[in-house]
Amino acid sequence: MIEATGQAPATEGLVLTRLREQFGDALLEVKVWRRETTVLLALQDLVRVCGYLRDHPDLAFDFLSSVTGVDRLKLPENSPRFEVVYHVYSIQHGRRLRLKVRAADDEAVPSVTGVWESANWHEREVFDLFGVPFEGHPNLCRILMPDDWEGHPLRKDYPVEASPKWWEEEPA
């Protein structure tokens, strides 16, 4: 939050200061807890914020360490249903940042493969296991489950008891 003086609070780090200066209202929510910073973004702002984080010399977030999904189906504030979480790291500056976007069921999340090539496999995993589509992904297809697998096994409403017979094992 910008104080009345127009300056960011003294406890806010360089990354948040730069993001607030450049994007302002695009930062829907910011949480700093135990020296870990999480920024919730709107879907339409994801790619440009990621590009800025990578390209700005004071920030240089050059490493996307992971992308994962969260099915928020049973959470009290469950709308929209899915959350896609990006963990980025600046090797040069030794800084970590967590970015999040939220998407409704079957709503596409913009792909960040144009920013970090490593997003290719990470986004495919989220698609395969949660069913979250990524708009602009170069090859969005299953990566972990067989091509003929029905459903997405990390969704909270996935019918675990309905696994195919070939998947079941004999009791020990």
Image (tube, rainbow, N blue to C red):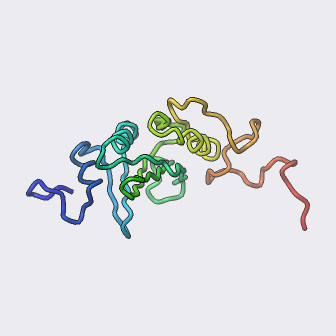
Q: Position of residue 166 (x, y in %)?
A: 87, 48
Quarter of the picture holding the N terminus: bottom left
**136 with respect to 54 (left or right):** right
Q: Quadrant of the C terminus?
A: bottom right
**Which one is in front, 4 or 47?**
47
Up the image or down, 148 lies above or below 16; here it is above
32 horizontally vs 24: left or right: right
Q: How many numbered circles are shown?
A: 0
| Residue at the image point whose x is 60% and y is 33% from the top | 140
Q: Nearer the viewer, residue 19 or 4?
A: 19
Residue positioned 51% across, 51% down in the render: 65
Residue 136 in percent (x, y) is at: 50, 29
Q: Position of residue 169 (x, y in %)?
A: 88, 57
Image position of 75 with respect to 108: above or below: below
Residue sitting at x 36%, y 53% = 39
Where 148 falls versus 36 (above or below)?
A: above
